[in-house]
Amino acid sequence: MELVAPDLHARICAFYDEYGFVCDDEIERWPDLFTDDATYKIVSRENHERELPLPTMSCDGRGMLRDRVTSMLRTSVYVPRQIRHLIANVRITGREDERVGTIANFAVFESFEDTGSRILAVGRYYDLIATSGPELRFKEKVCVYDGNLVPGSIIYPL
């Protein structure tokens, strides 16, 4: 894998900023941040480190991501909440062809009207970003949360 130019690193950091904003405030656009054939997984750190194929959530393709959003917005019954993503320490792990491997830390908070705020999940993203088109897109997004338990259920994307 070859190193990437500083301007591409800046574009990738801005892309992560956009990802956090979309997840928090424009969830309908979330699938648009992925390639058509993307994979999205949420997995515990223990399973990730042991290379166990047991994700908490897995979506293959943009269609499944759209179904997830539809489920969140129209069919799921859950307590209303506000979500906030903090994404930091974006590190480029390499580049191959028109894809860039990255690692970034994340913290996702959820807030409820009657009980305040709490940490939903903390961990790392292990991503593969497609750089071939005019816009960056996730080809693969693996959200590895620290610990083995996530409070409540994961409704919104990490």
Image: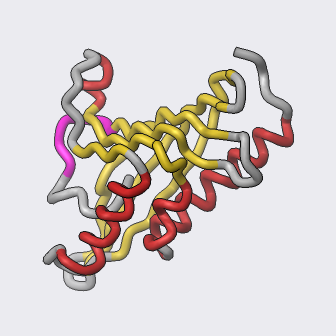
Tell me which residue sits at (55%, 45%) in the image.
Answer: 138
Q: Whole-percent x and y of residue 12? A: 69, 45
The reply, left or right, for residue 97 in relation to residue 140 is: right
Which of the 4 quarters of the picture holds residue 102?
top right
Residue depicted at x 31% and y 24% = 48
Task: Pick out the residue farthest to the bottom.
Answer: 113
Model colouring: secondary structure
Kindly identify the residue that appears in the image at 36 percent across and 36 percent down.
144
What segment carries the magenta color? Answer: 145-150
Residue 153 relative to residue 122: left or right:
left
Q: Nearer the viewer, residue 2 or 32?
A: 32
- Expressed as whole percent of the image width and height from the top left, the position of residue 14 reads 70, 54
Q: Position of residue 84 (x, y in %)?
A: 44, 66
The N terminus: image quadrant: top right
Q: Is residue 117 above or below residue 50?
A: below
Magenta region includes residue 138: no
**Where 100 sits versus 153, above or below?**
above
Question: Is 147 included in the stretch rendered in magenta?
Answer: yes
Residue 121 located left or right of residue 151: right
Residue 18: name its quadrant: bottom right
Taking the spot 48% from the left edge, 37% from the top edge, the residue there is: 140
In the rendered image, residue 112, in percent from the top left (x then y), is placed at: 26, 77
What secondary structure prevails in the magenta region? loop
